[in-house]
Amino acid sequence: DAGVTQSPTHLIKTRGQQVTLRCSPKSGHDTVSWYQQALGQGPQFIFQYYEEEERQRGNFPDRFSGHQFPNYSSELNVNALLLGDSALYLCASSLETGSRNEQFFGPGTRLTVL
Amino acid sequence: SQQGEEDPQALSIQEGENATMNCSYKTSINNLQWYRQNSGRGLVHLILIRSNEREKHSGRLRVTLDTSKKSSSLLITASRAADTASYFCAPSNDMRFGAGTRLTVKP
């Protein structure tokens, strides 16, 4: 039973570029959430996708966008990268109808913006 | 703003000692989850406690929940150097994390 997977593991970009991060949820899960974690901080909620729609959104600008595919996998896109976007990006999956709503996290993508 | 807030921010103990960290949250919850994160890696799910439970055990972990005080605690007994990590809590229906408790277990 595969857990949450993310790709790539590391990424280096320059300011102004665009980046796409990918996430495959745990088998059987249908909901995907994305988080940004700066060094020494807790994860900050970006948004959540369910049924291919953005359902909740945290306090992030429109430069952050996402998508969920019919197979429940998801992408996070960040446009016009800033130095401050350097962080660990975490994806978490859960089952919407599950009574426990446990979220399982992937290993993260480390993004460095130069 | 954060939903889960962990306290203390940092905790340093000797191997074999117990470690207790606390969590406070702001709104009503369905259940609350505790996670561990080793440096630079993803969060590992440790334990979930439902709103109608007061205490739950899993191995060396003991979690308590006081919904009247909107607080939870995580106790790690007989700590090991491998328990060195950051620990986070978050309600399942509102996964906003605090800064976590950074636990260091010295061998």
Image (cartoon, rainbow, N blue to C red):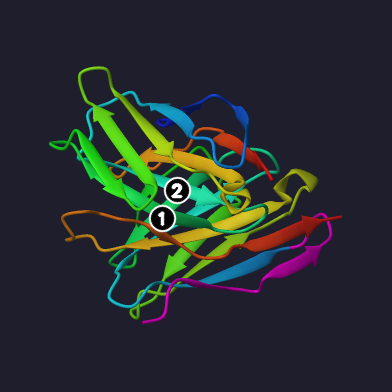
Residue B73, position as x, y percentages in the image: 37, 30
Q: Is residue A40 visible?
A: yes
Residue A32, position as x, y percentages in the image: 39, 62
Residue B14, position as x, y percentages in the image: 63, 36
Mark 1 Cα-neighbour bin, 10 Å: few <14, some 14–19, many ≥20: some
Question: Which of the numbered marks, if any, corresponds to residue B35?
Answer: 2
**Contact (Cβ within 8 Å) of mark 2 with mark 1:** yes
Quick check: B28 left or right of A4? left
Quarter holding residue B34: top left
Looking at the image, which residue is at 37% across and 73% down?
Answer: A26
Question: Which of the numbered marks, if any, corresponds to residue A8?
Answer: none
* Disc 1 chain ID: B
What's drawn in magenta, residue-wise? A1-17
Quick check: A93 left or right of A91? left
Looking at the image, which residue is at 63% across and 41% down?
Answer: B105
B47 drawn magenta? no
N-terminal label among 2 and 1: 2
The residues bearing labels 2 and 1 have C-alpha atoms spaced at a distance of: 5 Å
Looking at the image, which residue is at 19% across and 33% down?
Answer: B54
A6 drawn magenta? yes
Q: Nearer the viewer, residue B81 or B44?
A: B81
Looking at the rendered structure, the kind of residue marked 2 is Tyr
Q: Single out the residue that lies furthest toward the front.
A: B16
Dot 2: what SS? strand
Looking at the rendered structure, the kind of residue marked 1 is His
Q: Single out the residue that lies furthest toward the right.
A: A114
Question: Which of the numbered marks, if any, corresponds to residue B45?
Answer: 1
